[in-house]
Image: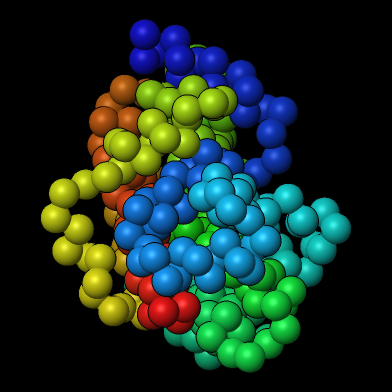
């Protein structure tokens, strides 16, 4: 059953634009966050979105991907790029210039959200923040100099052509949660780990990015030095799906911490 479901997802991948997490992955991040956002912050989130339903917050968490064609200058905000040999981010080296990166944009939109900016500006900052914190936790969203990006590392995923980015974006979570109604909830339930010691850790976006970097360069991820041609099968899923789910959970918990601090 798992193999058949994964094969179906791969067939769908070819018709979908590349994202950091799938839309349902982003919705699941925001479901995790909503579970832990306090009542005051929830009321402010809904007021900024002119909404009365948590589901509209979940949809707002996908918004930053939907505007990429209209606002291509925001594309670099979703990821991070650094030298292949680096094992930590250097903001001066890796996040300078007008294009910036996800770390700087999370910091920027957090400041906007806590400011006295106009409502429309704060609503946009909220939508970017909810999305980009999730992106900061996507290992295949990191690119390295002198290394093929994850989108160009081709391979076979359950008998169909795919690439490393799509495997992390959709494949690992879609192997048990078909896209469609209820998929985000399925991912949310699977990602809801007990303990969550990383929850109120008060770490910075830079430290989150460094954690994600270590996932990206770890051998089970199969990123560095990979020139393509891999088979992403059962073993790869068993090794990496728990990591993908934990990254989704971390992103949600940390998003909730930011919203509680900024909006309460």
Where is residue 61, by image quadrant? bottom right
Left or right: where does residue 25 sit relative to residue 219? Answer: right
| Residue depicted at x 60% and y 49% | 56
Q: Where is residue 47? Give x, y as percent.
A: 61, 67
Q: Where is residue 182? Give x, y as percent.
A: 47, 28
Relative to 202, is 67 above or below? above
| Residue depicted at x 39% and y 13% | 3
Left or right: where does residue 54 sit relative to residue 35? Answer: right
Where is residue 245, by image quadrant? top left
| Residue depicted at x 69% and y 34% | 16
Which residue, as the protein is rendered here, is positioned at the far right? 70
Q: Which is more toward the observer, 126 or 144? A: 126
Q: Is residue 114 visible?
A: yes
Q: Where is residue 90? Give x, y as percent.
A: 45, 84
Q: Which is more toward the observer, 225 or 149? A: 149
Q: Dividing the image into 4 quarters, which one contains the C terminus? A: bottom left
Relative to 119, is 170 above or below? above
Where is residue 190, by image quadrant? top left
Q: Where is residue 222? Give x, y as percent.
A: 38, 44
Q: Which is more toward the observer, 65 or 212? A: 65
Q: Dividing the image into 4 quarters, which one contains the N terminus? A: top left
| Residue depicted at x 47% and y 29% | 183
């Amino acid at each position: 059953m798992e193999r058949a479901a994964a094969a179906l997802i791969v067939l769908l991948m070819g018709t979908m634009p590349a994202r950091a997490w799938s839309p349902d992955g982003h919705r699941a991040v925001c479901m995790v966050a909503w579970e832990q956002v306090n009542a005051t912050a929830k009321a402010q989130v809904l007021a900024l979105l002119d909404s009365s339903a948590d589901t509209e917050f979940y949809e707002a968490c996908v918004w930053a991907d939907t505007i990429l064609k209209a606002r291509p200058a925001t594309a670099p905000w979703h990821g991070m790029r650094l030298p292949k040999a680096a094992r930590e981010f250097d903001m001066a080296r890796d996040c300078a210039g007008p294009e910036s990166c996800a770390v700087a944009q999370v910091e920027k939109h957090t400041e906007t959200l806590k400011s006295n900016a106009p409502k429309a500006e704060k609503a946009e900052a909220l939508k970017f923040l909810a999305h980009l914190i999730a992106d900061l936790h996507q290992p295949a969203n990191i690119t390295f100099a002198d290394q093929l990006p994850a989108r160009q590392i081709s391979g076979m995923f359950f008998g169909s052509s795919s690439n490393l980015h799509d495997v992390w974006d959709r494949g690992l979570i879609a192997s048990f949660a078909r896209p469609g109604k209820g998929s985000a909830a399925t991912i949310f339930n699977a990602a809801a780990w007990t303990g969550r010691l990383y929850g109120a850790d008060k770490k910075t976006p830079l430290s989150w990015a460094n954690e994600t970097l270590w996932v990206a360069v770890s051998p089970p991820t199969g990123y560095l030095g990979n020139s393509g041609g891999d088979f992403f099968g059962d073993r790869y899923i068993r090794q990496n799906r728990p990591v993908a789910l934990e990254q989704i959970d971390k992103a949600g918990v940390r998003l909730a911490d930011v919203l509680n601090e900024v909006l309460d």
